[in-house]
Image (cartoon, rainbow, N blue to C red):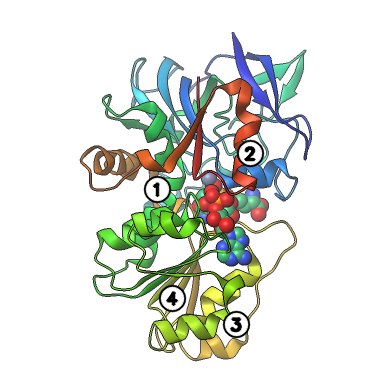
């Protein structure tokens, strides 16, 4: 079949809207009509050529929602007509990682996913006879895409596509970092670095679990108002401080935070986030994805004196199990999504979404097909 898609032919070039050929689902795969997709900073990072796994030409996009249109042989958990969210972190429930109960990082198809192909080693997308790579196993910047059955979460049918697509990455990542990875408790003091599409979701989850001080740090003053809407109690712009940002944060939290979260992808900020943790027990969670070649550093003394550095992918969420629950939280009003979707665009205008993100003017842009 044919599908309209925004293709990343080369790094650092705008996406091009073209018609691709798409092969139908093979055994264990499903064809999904994507109804809406968010644009996450990770898409921009890959398009900018900063991802060590980045491949071109490819169909980017990993924050979608849609409807199953066809299933391949052996598919039992979904059927045509089901509403689903594609999962870049699948959940096979059979691999060592899934069975461990200790991680959401299913390994069943990670190797082929990183190579831009389906589990059988081939791509379903092609353009003028040449294969086009898949991205993060999702490729939601195409109106139709093919996914392994283990990489779709079935969701309720009354959830709007144009908002629930955000659960496919940003919402789950931010909320899950608080509830699954950090396990923030009522009364804890937390600091969030970077108040974008991920950071605001960290804030709202911290409010939901009853955190005490919820401090937001951003270099863009426009983010203060956004932060306050989602539970932030204090705002710090490091560029407007006379002194050192870590010292100021340690002062504000009477010795350091119980939990800090990096939602910037900047390795200097990651160090600040660790060092703003409380001596003896503070935990810093790395969410931001850093560009290829970057490394984190700190004085080992920071760890010797009890601070803990950890990270999270997809908020530690087990996709097929947890994503439907997060959609329920949204539909039942436990978490907020609608106001974070600041821009809704057509596929033809998808490049504007990247500009808005780089200019700091959007929280989430969503393409509606
Ligand atoms: P975004 O562009 O919406 O937000 C980033 C925010 O960080 C902006 O508000 C920006 O002003 C702020 N910022 C930039 N530099 C800063 C600095 N030096 N100090 C303080 N604030 C600064 O991006 P997003 O979609 O929220 O994504 C954030 C990061 O999370 C990206 O690196 C993305 O790749 C990553 N991410 C990781 C996961 C995961 O599973 N680990 C999932 C989604 C996104
Ligand atoms: N490919 C990059 C790493 C990118 C990365 O860490 N991705 C996150 C999700 S970001 C979503 O917006 C993730 O899930 N990581 C775990 C995994 O298995 O990819 C690189 O540095 O090579
Ligand atoms: Zn993402």
Q: Which residue bears the numbered disc 4?
A: 283
Front residue of 214/137: it is: 214
Corner quadrant of residue 137: top right
**Which secondary structure lies at badge 3?**
loop
Number of other residues with Cα within 10 Å of mark 4, as a class: few under 14, some 14 to 19, many 20 or more: many
Which one is earlier in the sequence, the residue at label 2 or at label 4? 4
Q: Residue at x 30, y 39 (%)?
A: 327
- Numbered tag placed on residue 172 in the rendering: 1
Residue ID at (27%, 29%): 156
Residue drawn at (54%, 69%) of the image:
237
State whether residue 265 appears in this view: no
Q: Which quadrant of the rendered structure holds the N terminus?
A: top right
Classify mark 4: helix, strand or loop: strand
| Residue 293 on image: x %, y % | 75, 61
Q: Give the crowd class for mark 3: few <14, some 14-19, many >=20 residues within 10 Å.
A: few
How many angstroms separate mark 2 from mark 4 (CA)?
32 Å
Proximity of marks 1 and 4: CB atoms separated by less than 8 Å: no
| Label 2: element kind | helix
Residue identified by numbered label 3: 242
Foreground disc of the pair 3, 2: 3
- Between discs 1 and 2, the one toward the N terminus: 1
Q: Residue at x 59, y 47 (%)?
A: 41
Pick the front one: 53 or 270:
270
**What label sits on residue 139 in the rendered view?**
none
- Report which residue position mark 2 lands on: 354
Q: What whole-number distance in Å separates the C-alpha atoms at marks 1 and 4?
A: 20 Å
Rendering coords of residue 328 (x, y %): 25, 39
How far is disc 3 from disc 2 in space, using C-alphas?
A: 33 Å
Residue at disc 1, secondary structure: helix
């Amino acid at each position: 079949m044919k599908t309209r898609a925004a293709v990343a032919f080369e790094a650092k070039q705008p996406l091009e809207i073209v018609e691709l050929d798409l092969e139908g689902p093979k055994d264990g795969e499903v064809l999904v009509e994507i109804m809406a997709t968010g644009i996450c900073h990770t898409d921009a990072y890959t398009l900018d050529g900063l991802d060590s796994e980045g491949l071109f030409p490819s169909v980017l996009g990993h924050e979608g929602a849609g409807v199953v249109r066809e299933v391949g042989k052996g598919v039992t958990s979904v059927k045509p007509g089901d509403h689903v969210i594609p999962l870049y972190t699948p959940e096979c429930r059979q691999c060592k990682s899934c069975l461990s109960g200790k991680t959401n990082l299913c390994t069943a198809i990670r190797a082929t996913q990183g190579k831009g192909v389906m589990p059988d080693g081939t791509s379903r997308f092609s353009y003028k006879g040449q294969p086009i790579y898949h991205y993060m196993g999702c490729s939601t910047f195409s109106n139709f895409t093919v996914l392994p059955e283990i990489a779709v979460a079935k969701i309720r049918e009354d959830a709007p596509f144009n908002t629930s697509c955000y659960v496919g990455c940003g919402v789950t990542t931010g909320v899950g970092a608080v509830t699954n990875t950090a396990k923030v408790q009522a009364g804890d003091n937390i600091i969030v670095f970077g108040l974008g599409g991920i950071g605001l979701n960290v804030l709202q989850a911290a409010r939901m679990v009853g955190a005490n001080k919820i401090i937001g740090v951003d270099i863009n003053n426009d983010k203060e108002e956004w932060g306050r809407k989602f539970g932030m109690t204090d705002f710090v712009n490091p560029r407007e401080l006379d002194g050192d940002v870590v010292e100021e944060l340690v002062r504000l939290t009477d010795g350091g935070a119980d939990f800090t979260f990096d939602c910037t992808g900047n390795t200097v900020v990651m160090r600040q986030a660790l060092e703003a943790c409380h001596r003896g027990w503070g935990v810093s969670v790395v969410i931001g994805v850093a560009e290829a070649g970057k490394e984190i550093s700190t004085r080992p003394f920071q760890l010797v004196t009890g601070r803990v550095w950890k990270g999270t992918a997809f908020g530690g969420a087990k996709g097929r199990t947890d994503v439907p629950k997060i959609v329920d939280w949204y539909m039942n009003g436990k978490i907020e999504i609608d106001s974070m979707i600041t821009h809704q665009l057509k596929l033809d205008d998808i490049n504007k979404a990247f500009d808005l993100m780089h200019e700091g003017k959007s929280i989430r842009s969503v393409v509606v097909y």
